[in-house]
Amino acid sequence: MDFSYAPEDEEFREELRSWLDANLPEFKDLGEIGPEQSDSTLRTMQRRQAWQRRLNEGRWAAINWPIEWGGREATIMQNVIYSAVMAEARAPGIYNANGIWQIGPMIIRWGTQEQKEMWLPGILNADEHWCQGFTEPEAGSDLANLRTQAVQDGDMYILNGRKIWISSAHLAKWGLFLVRTDPTAISRGAKHEGITALIVDMEAPGIECTPIRDVTGAAMFNEVTFTDAPMPVAYRLGEEGNGWGVAMGTLGHERVGTAGMSIGLASELQRMIDAARTHNPEALEDPDIRDRIARAWTQIELTRLLNNRALSKVLKGEKNWPEVPLAKLQWSHLSQSLAELNLDLLGPLGALAKGGPDAIDGGHAAYNYPWQRFTSIGAGATEVQKNIIADRAIQLPRR
Ligand SMILES: Cc1cc2nc3c(=O)[nH]c(=O)nc-3n(C[C@H](O)[C@H](O)[C@H](O)COP(=O)(O)OP(=O)(O)OC[C@H]3O[C@@H](n4cnc5c(N)ncnc54)[C@H](O)[C@@H]3O)c2cc1C
């Protein structure tokens, strides 16, 4: 590992820290809300909208975007500093995370001038909420198997099909969807071809969003059905049939956005220990629990070193491989084991539900335990990551 912070990086860090000192306190309780409960979803979204707008006022909302579109054209090192400082400060979530980190960069990379003018300002200033519609009942880990059809009729595409697990689609005005424009591609054995990226107006006729209740009781996921839904061909992003390239080019664009991961996990562990000191101090005398805390701390430190190694490779122009799938596994394993440890640290009090009069730490432990299960399926399922490591990093023999 060989990297150091240049004076301009330190300046960037200081500028961000002092901006947060001046602007974050009034939004601070946002950090404690956590993933949405259905009854407070609207309130949470309004607060996230206000926070994203404040970030945008300081030009801190979309640091990777070009300067002409309100960004800072941040370097890799500045990205690392940004995510570390935000994690240290426990800054709240934003209204259009998908829009800022994934969809906006896709529009910047592939969109026409008219498309950029139409959509980028609204994403940046949190004027309209965006969702991302990739997954289908038969296309999750095997995303290229997607079948939602778009058939061109004059200057419109007519959409038919079904997407699932689409976060916040019921709140979104716009969505970036992957649709199939060449239905023969799957039977030809070329399923990555014939996919098109299309921006969808979620208020168009023929689109129905049905929220699905998850294991925490919240209902932020949706099934989205298209029944002869018309969408202008002018909303297509990139060439017809190049949707795989559009989507994958930008998912890779996430770069080293995991730099804040170990700081976030360390701060979560500290928060748990503080809550146990106040509410259930005898747990901290238990040798088994003490051992688990020490193991968690060691694993968090290993995660920090893994992220640093990935960064060092990127700075030397190498691929950050296989650190990316390894870090994904570390994140899901640690998030889930911390959530479990939190319940044991608090004892019976930890099970008190969010919103209840006696809930401690906002009911965080009871909520977080089931919620963290998503980390072994979202952003690449655990078994699939292990397959990739076995196949391409360790090169285990195939049967
Ligand atoms: C919190 C959350 C938010 C989400 N938000 C969105 C969103 O906004 N938009 C969107 O498009 N999607 C979203 N998704 C969906 C997500 O992308 C999919 O859940 C994910 O791609 C996995 O697909 P799947 O659910 O169909 O599971 P599957 O791919 O069917 O996997 C099911 C199980 O089989 C295992 N498995 C699959 N393939 C293999 C294999 N080859 N070898 C061994 N084991 C295998 C997996 O590891 C997993 O355990 C979200 C999911 C979650 C959890």
Image: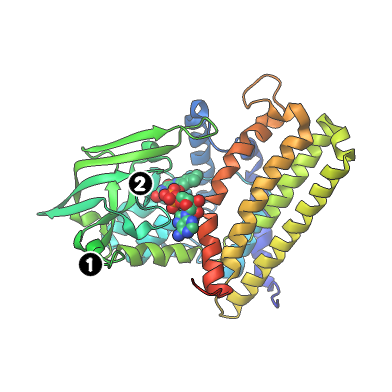
**Residue sticking out furthest to the top:** 357
Q: Tell me the CA gap for discs 1 and 2.
A: 21 Å
**Horizontal placement of 376 versus 251: left or right?**
right
The crowding category of the residue bearing disc 2, from other C-alpha atoms within 10 Å (few below 14, some 14 to 19, many at least 20), is few
* Amino acid, disc 1: Arg
Residue 326: percent from left, percent from top? 61, 64
Question: Which numbered disc covers residue 188?
Answer: 1
Let me know if residue 177 appears in the view: yes
SS under mark 1? loop
The crowding category of the residue bearing disc 1, from other C-alpha atoms within 10 Å (few below 14, some 14 to 19, many at least 20), is few
Residue drawn at (40%, 52%), measured in percent from left and top?
Answer: 140
Task: Name the residue beneath numbered marker 2.
Answer: 137
**Horizontal placement of 268 versus 177: left or right?**
right
Query: Is the residue at mark 2 in contact range of ligand 1, meaning its CB lies under 8 Å from it?
Result: yes
Q: Nearer the viewer, residue 360 or 3?
A: 360
**Horizontal placement of 223 versus 338: left or right?**
left
Q: Earlier in the sequence, mark 1 or mark 2?
A: 2
Query: Is the residue at mark 1 in contact range of ligand 1, meaning its CB lies under 8 Å from it?
Result: no
Quarter of the image with the N terminus is: bottom right
Residue drawn at (50%, 25%), measured in percent from left and top?
Answer: 39
Residue 112: percent from left, percent from top? 28, 63
SS under mark 2? loop
Question: Can you say whether 38 is above or below 28 in the image?
Answer: above
Residue drawn at (69%, 28%), measured in percent from left and top?
Answer: 351
Question: Can you say whether 276 is above or below 164 in the image?
Answer: above
Asked if the residue at tag 2 contacts the one at tag 1, i.e. Cβ–Cβ closer than 8 Å, the answer is no
Residue 49: percent from left, percent from top? 48, 40
**Residue sticking out furthest to the left:** 154
Residue 275: percent from left, percent from top? 78, 35
Q: Nearer the viewer, residue 311 or 23?
A: 311
* Amino acid, disc 2: Pro
Residue drawn at (64%, 38%), measured in percent from left and top?
Answer: 369
